[in-house]
Amino acid sequence: MRVTFNTKFNQGLDGILNTQQRLLRAQDQMIKQTKILTPADDPSGSAKVLGVGQNLSQLDQYEQNSIAVKNNLGVEETVLTSVREAMDRARVLSLASGNGSYSAAEREAVAQEIEGIQQQLLDLMNSRNVEGGYLFSGFQDGVKAFSLDPSTGKYVFNGDDGQKSLQVSPGVTLPVNDSGKVVFDNVQVSPVPSPPVIALPGPVSASVDVVNPDIFNSFYVNNYDKITPANNTFSVELTAPSNYQITRGGSPLVPPVTGAYTSGQPINFNGLDIVINGPAGAGQVDFDLPAPEKTNILNTLSELMVALRTPGPVDVAFQASVSKAVGEIDAASTSVASARSAIGGRINVMDSINGSNADLEILATQYQADIAEVDFAKVIAELTKEETALQAVQTTFSSITNTSLFDYIR
C-alpha cells in the first residue's frame, strides 16, 4: 500500500485534533465539576441528575415557603401576646370598677384607661404582616380588618374568614394567618333577658337582672330553643292567694317552679333575680331569652365605658353590666389563647418538617454528586496524560511533516 505525504499529514493532524478534543473535555469536566457534559455522555445518568435537580429546586421552594410561614406566624404571635396583655389589664379594671366605693371621678378615670386600651387593641387587630397586608383580614389583606361603623357606633369586621396557606413539604400545607372573624369577632355575647313585660294586669313594675352569670349562662345554653321561639318566653304568673308559678311557652316547668310571692322581694330563678312590685293574687310578667349573638372585645369595652360613665349608684344593673363585660373579656381571651396555641403547633410542625427537608436535601445532593460529580484526582491525571500525549503528537507531526526526499539525496 502506498503511503503518500498527504496521508501522513492527515493522520498526524487527526491525531492532534483528537488529542486536543480529549484534553478540552478533561478541562471542561474540571471547570464545570461534572463528568456529564452532555446527555450523550450518560443518558441514564443525565436523566437522573435532571430529576434530582428538580427535587432540589422543590426543596429550595419549600424552604422559602417555610421562612415566609415562620415570619408571618412570628408577627401574629407577637401581636396576639400584646392583645392578651391588654385584655388582661381590661379585665382587672372591669373587676375593680365594680367596687361600690368608687366615686364618679374614679369611674371616669377607669373609663378613660379602658378607652386607651380599646384604641390599643384596635391598632393591634389592624396589624400588618411582613408583606404589608392586614394580618387579620383573611384573603382580603388589602382591607383594614376592623373599623367603627358610625351609623351603629359598633366596631365591625371588614375582612373574610379566609386563611392563606403555603406548602412546606409534598404533603403538608400550613396556614400563614388567622382571620380576625375567628380570633376576635367570634365572642359569644353574655346573654341578658329582655326587659320584662306586664302581660296581665296586677303588677305595677318588674325587673329581671342577672345576679349569677355562670348559672344563668349554663341555663341559657341548655334551654334556648332555636326551633320553637315560643319556648324562649318565660312567664311569672301570680296566683291566689299570694303565690307565683314560672311557666315556659305557657306551660308549667318540669319540675314545677312555684313559691310564695311578696311584692318587692326577688324571686331567684337560675341565676336571675326577678323583682315584681304590686299586689298578690293576679297578674303575669313575661321575659324572653335573647337570640345568640356574636361580638368582639372592642364593642364589649364600649358597653363597659357607657356603664362606667352613666351616673348612679353601684346597683344590680351596674354589677350586671360589669359581670357581662368580664364574661366577654374572658371569652375573648380564651379565643386569643387558642389562636396562640394553634400558632405554636404550626411552628412546631414546621420546624420538624424543615429538619426532614434538610436531611432530604443532603441525601439528594449526595446522590447527584455520586452520579455526576467529577473525581478531581482522576480528571487531573487524565488532563496530565492528554497534555503529554498532545505534546508527543505535536512533536511527531512536526518531525514527519518536515521530512522530504531531499533529506535522502545527500
Image (tube, rainbow, N blue to C red):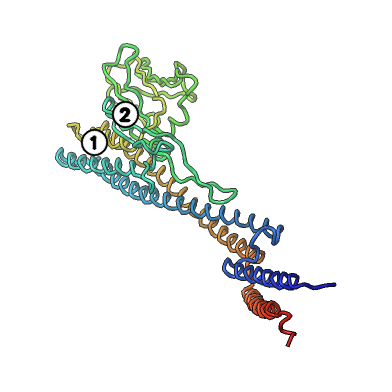
Residue 349 seen in the current view: no
Tell me the crowding category of disc 1: few under 14, some 14 to 19, or many 20 or more residues within 10 angstroms, Cα based.
many
Q: Nearer the viewer, mark 1 or mark 2?
A: 1
From mark 1 to mark 2, how far is it between C-alphas? 20 Å
Residue 248 seen in the current view: yes
- State left or right for residue 15 relative to residue 106: right
- Residue toward you, 385 or 36: 385
Q: Amino acid under label 2?
A: Asp
- State left or right for residue 182 relative to residue 48: left
Query: The C terminus is located in which quarter?
Result: bottom right
Vertical comparison of 79 with 250: above or below:
below
Q: Quadrant of residue 111?
A: top left
Tell which residue pokes out farthest to the right in this image.
1
Tell me the crowding category of disc 2: few under 14, some 14 to 19, or many 20 or more residues within 10 angstroms, Cα based.
many
Tell which residue pokes out farthest to the bottom in this image.
410
Give the label on residue 148, or none.
none
Local SS, label 1: helix
- State left or right for residue 13 relative to residue 177: right
Query: The N terminus is located in which quarter?
Result: bottom right
Badge 1 or badge 2: first in the primary sequence? 2
- Residue toward you, 186 or 128: 128
Q: Amino acid under label 1?
A: Met
Number of numbered markers: 2
Q: Quadrant of residue 158?
A: top left
Residue 65: x and y, percent? 49, 51
Residue 293: x and y, percent? 39, 29
Give the label on residue 305, or none.
1
Tell which residue pokes out farthest to the left in this image.
105
Residue 368: x and y, percent? 63, 62
Residue 135: x and y, percent? 38, 43
| Mark 2, residue position | 209
Local SS, label 2: strand
